[in-house]
Image (cartoon, rainbow, N blue to C red):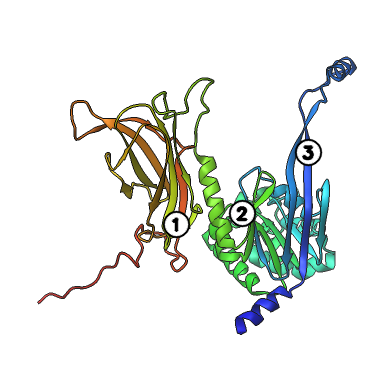
Amino acid sequence: MASKETAKKEDDRPVVLSVQHVAKSFRLPTEQATGLKMAFLNWTKGVSGFTEQKVLRDISFEVKQGDFFGIVGRNGSGKSTLLKIISGIYVPDKGTVTVNGKLVSFIELGVGFNPELTGRENVYLNGALLGFTREEIDAMYDDIVDFAELGDFMDQKLKNYSSGMQVRLAFSVAIKAQGDILVLDEVLAVGDEAFQRKCDNFFTKVKKDSKKTVILVTHSMDAVKRYCNNAILIKDGMIIASGDKDKVADQYTLENIRVDQKHSKPKKNEHPEGLNDRVPVFRITPVSQTVANCSDPFLFDIEYQYDGDDGYIAIAMNDIKRGGIPYDSGQKNLHVKAGHHVLHMSMPLKLFNNGEFRLVGSFRIPNKTDEKRTDMIAYTNDDNSLVFAVRDPSNTRDYALLNDSEMKMTIQGYDK
């Protein structure tokens, strides 16, 4: 009963930020006209002089009072543009943004700071840029200085500060500003270890304050899982995952792994890396969700096309985070026939702790001189291999490979 009342109470929280169907594009110059003649020639050729880059496409979400809301995505996905629209720096081409409360935006460390002014003067300058009156800045000044631990340096010019000192001052101005909604972009990794502990304590305190709302853009999935209660994942200007912070963080991890896989596109009339005329098709694709529960079997397909006699497929499982190969099916484990076929595969996951893995396949034929051996004639490149993550809802430990529920050490006795 208590859980239902708590859920209802959370549902009744007011919406402090509503983003509805927001889209934003930028025009990028493609050809410069150095004079009227060149401009006229471009016009006659139908050259517009720019290309339109769609950065955000129909973005919609809501943030409620007390949320610690995460926005994640790779560089170039549109996160910073979205924050600038929320902060009123950019105007969307389409859609609306509604803010209920005083919003304090801190998009880039040090923006609005002047190196020729003192630390004290920069606090008042930056506070004014954030929309605070001098009286409001007076009231928060001591807290800003104490948090930054720069009391002995506030009357020195900013250009004499170390980069770490500048970061601490800028960050302190942002988080000590008394706003209802705090918008932060990539600021959790500032300062030394002691200052980061102080920042961690601050965010832990803010997270417990039902009146304060934080919108955080970060590449740290540990920060998302630790602080946030909701999150969205943006890719190519669109939201591809939203809601549960752990699921969004896991999806981002997989997206990151896929995009980071380096590969070269084949030239025309050439096979992709790892394939050839004898094996022109060879790929592993998921059937189960790529963020898999360790209690369920993981289902996947192996598609291949093979022109020959006896053939074998070997599957190796690579541990992306910890390194090594925790499983190899063996060279002659899967005997396959010629032609174009799809194998439906199942693999248990209950043995594994949390982790990210890659399934890599190799296509093999019998060695002509040694019947115990096989020769590899094709393999799945990065594009054709399968990346997935294992998550145990009851276990947050991901240091070791094996799951405690499956791999337990027990004392059999003591020395006599």
How far apart, in angstroms, are the residues tagged by discs 2 and 1?
Answer: 23 Å
Graded by Cα atoms within 10 Å as few (under 14), some (14 to 19) or many (20 or more), the crowding at tag 1 reads: many
Graded by Cα atoms within 10 Å as few (under 14), some (14 to 19) or many (20 or more), the crowding at tag 2 reads: many
Where does residue 66 sit, x and y in percent of width and height? Answer: 69, 71
193 relative position to 373: left or right: right
Amino acid residing under circle 2: Thr
Say which mark, if any, is on residue 390.
1
Residue name at image x 49 percent, y 50 percent: 287
Residue name at image x 35 percent, y 68 percent: 405
Closer mark to the observer between disc 3 and disc 2: 3
Residue 12 occupies quadrant: bottom right
How many marks do you count on the picture? 3
Closer mark to the observer between disc 1 and disc 3: 1
Residue name at image x 36 percent, y 36 percent: 362
Indicate the secondary structure of the residue bearing disc 1. strand
Residue found at the far left of this picture: 416
Residue name at image x 44 percent, y 63 percent: 392
Residue of label 3: 26
2 or 1: tag closer to the N-terminus: 2
Say which mark, if any, is on residue 45.
none
Q: Is residue 351 or residue 154 the one in the foreground?
A: 351
1 or 3: tag closer to the N-terminus: 3
Residue of label 2: 218
